[in-house]
Amino acid sequence: MPGVTLEDPFPIARFHNVIPAAGPVNKFAVDINPVVQSAEIDAADRSDQVLVSVQSEGIKLYNSGDQKCLKSWMIPPGIILAQPAIHRVCDTIEYTFALVSSGTDITEKEENKIVWMWKSTKEDTNTDNRVAKTFNDRIQAIHISPALPSHLILVNENGSIALMTNELDRMVAKTIHASSGTVIWSNVFVTSAPTVRPCCISSSLVPVNSTIILTISSVPKTADKYTLSLYYCNEERRSIDPMVKTELVLKEAPVDFTFDSTDGRISVLGSAGTWSVWRMHLRHTTGHKVIGEIEPHLSMHFKGYRFSSDKLGKIASIASLDGSYIALVAPRIKSGAEGLEHVVSIWDMKYGTLQAERILQLGDKSAYGMDKCVYKIQVLPNQQQLAISVSSISTSTKNQSKSKTKSMSDVKSVVVLCPYYNERISLMAAMGRMSSTVAFLGEEDALGLSRSGFDAVTDPNHFAHDEKTIYDRWLKRLEKAQDNESDLLASLLRPTLTVDEFTELFFDALPDMENPSVSNGKARNSYVDGGIVPALLERNDWDLIMVVLDHLPDIPETAHVALLSAFIEKREAGALPQHHVSTFFAKLLTSPYNEIFLQQALKQLTVSELPMVLDLILQQLKQISENDGRGRFYELIELANGVLDSHYPVIILEPSMYETVRELQELVDQEACIAEEMVQLKSMMRPFERKHRKLIAERQSRKKVEGPSRPKNSSNQGIPVYRVEVFQF
């Protein structure tokens, strides 16, 4: 099943306008934004709306379902916006915000300092109630957080951040320290609980449903160094607190960025055609200080693509999708004299594979030609659609007077929507796209998927033994067992055998024979007065203890803990054979027990035994990880939970156990991630599982006596192999 499916794109609007020539350079001609709803509004009630900003013309609210324009706000001719406008819905009130970059009536000192706001209701069609607010600092971007329905966030170019009310009449908070460089990109996201949605910032660092602001700033006097900063918007204290600051080194000038808050992946599109992905990790240190680390994850060069232009500046655009994907829209140059393609593609950020792509058919090839187009892309997550704008820009000179001329740009734009469906990226989904990715990148020496189907997963087993061979082997094993039993009985019945010799010989042979009453599950703990385990511990008979752990179903939980304490004592004294040391703990885990009773029994462990028990659990978990998950992982976790729940006061007060508990946590998190990825492979493995069962059934049927012959045209294929693909609508 593919990780992503892209459907055919369809247009919702076309525009033709004239703007100042400097307007679209490194900004936009037409851009899109989703409508931001407050966090209290249910996802099912969110409307299918998209906001389109057209430079020097207006802001238009469209319904993506029927492509109708619902509302529009006028922008005076010559006005250039610094970013696409933002529209938010708070209960019955709707707000629209726009950041003014330049214009005929805007002085140089006012550029990027004026914010426009329109306020209306769903029934109110009046859009002439614009409110303007001028700020002291140049604003890099306006952001809105669903967790802050009454406020908007202003990220300034100098690195300071302000929290304003929706009415723009009051500043609630502002950072004190500004950055030494210039902010070139910023993003806002909301943290979530691990049970709802994973987040790169854990709830131990900040509360759940907190607003986090991420900024990337250039470092003065350097060409390749940038500063990545995180800020926490503390709503209770009405402050914006810095969290972490780290350095990012980029070999190419950045064209666009994305950030995935699920796993902390930062995606960077370089001007020379390189796409790189970085991974951010946050952790606590002593003194409750937060430290951030950024490490490179992957880097790829896109051949044939153009991400920037000397004439238009940054022309390509990327956007982040759920499930560790990015969507890219950019021009691709065809080989020879075939011209240009407008391509939207989706790549996974985990393995770097091309998951899907579509060619945008814009109609007029001469208008949307080489070095003429600027591309923008946004994700409409509630509608599972990509919103894409392509603007063709032609510059001309207009005479204003005899001594003065002004350059203007004639802009033709089209806005298209492209529905997509995606599952979270998995290894199998990435492997399924390796061949096409290698062909796309033109790297012949790269790895790709060369085999498919059942043979790519496993090889069928062939059983060549007939019934006579199997019977002969069984008969030899039976005769050998009878001979061993006869020899043992003869030794035990020797007249010269003393009582001590008889006892030693009998109990030495008993584990090897595995008493039938025990191995068949017929023995019970109550058959021995006081219980079997205490009796065996008194005799120090660990061979028989191993047999009892395998086959006795009713060993009390207190006996389990007594065995664990005795094992620790014997192991520390070096009084146990190595084969018992390596297998005892695994056998103890497989022995049946009641979780509640075991938790109570674990309270018998002493303070001196507790570190050794935790070390046993840690070593067993490492062994399971090294054996690719083969082992009693679930039972081990249950035992670990019982130990931690029963002795958490001791563990908290004893620093010597902190390191062991931390290693336990890391290993469990690692295994949990692997388990989650394996669950994602479940639907992929079903066809191979069916084929495997079918092969086993065919082999079993060949062993039976052949029945009546089938008709000549009868099929023995059974139900054909099929698979189910689940799509999200």
Image (spheres, helix red, strand yellow):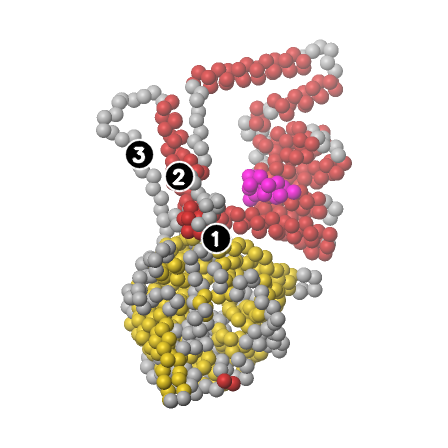
- Which residue is nearer to you in this view: 158 or 342? 342
- Which residue is nearer to you in this view: 624 or 597? 624
Under circle 3, the secondary element is: loop
Position of residue 154 relative to residue 243, above or below, is below
- Residue at screen point 62% across, 78% down: 176
- Which residue is nearer to you in this view: 303 or 385? 303
- Front label number (1 vs 2): 1
Q: Are marks 1 and 3 in contact (CB under 8 Å)?
A: no
How far is disc 1 from disc 3 in space, using C-alphas? 39 Å
Residue 352: mark in rendering: 1
Q: Where residue 698 sits: x, y (%)?
A: 36, 28
Label 2 environment density (alpha carbons within 10 Å; few <14, some 14–19, many ≥20): few
The C terminus lies in quadrant: bottom left
Left or right: 587, with 99 as reference point: right
The main secondary structure of the magenta stretch is: helix
Name the N-terminal-most of marks 1 and 3: 1
- The residue that disc 2 covers is 453
The residues colored magenta run: 619-635
Name the N-terminal-most of marks 1 and 2: 1
Quadrant of res 384: bottom left
Residue 240: mark in rendering: none
Three-letter amino acid code of the residue under disc 3:
Gly
Residue 594 in view:
no
- Residue at screen point 39% across, 62% down: 331
Residue 316 in view:
yes
- The residue that disc 3 covers is 718
Under circle 2, the secondary element is: loop
How far is disc 2 from disc 3 in space, using C-alphas? 18 Å
Name the N-terminal-most of marks 2 and 3: 2
Residue closest to the far right: 573
Left or right: 399, with 224 as reference point: left
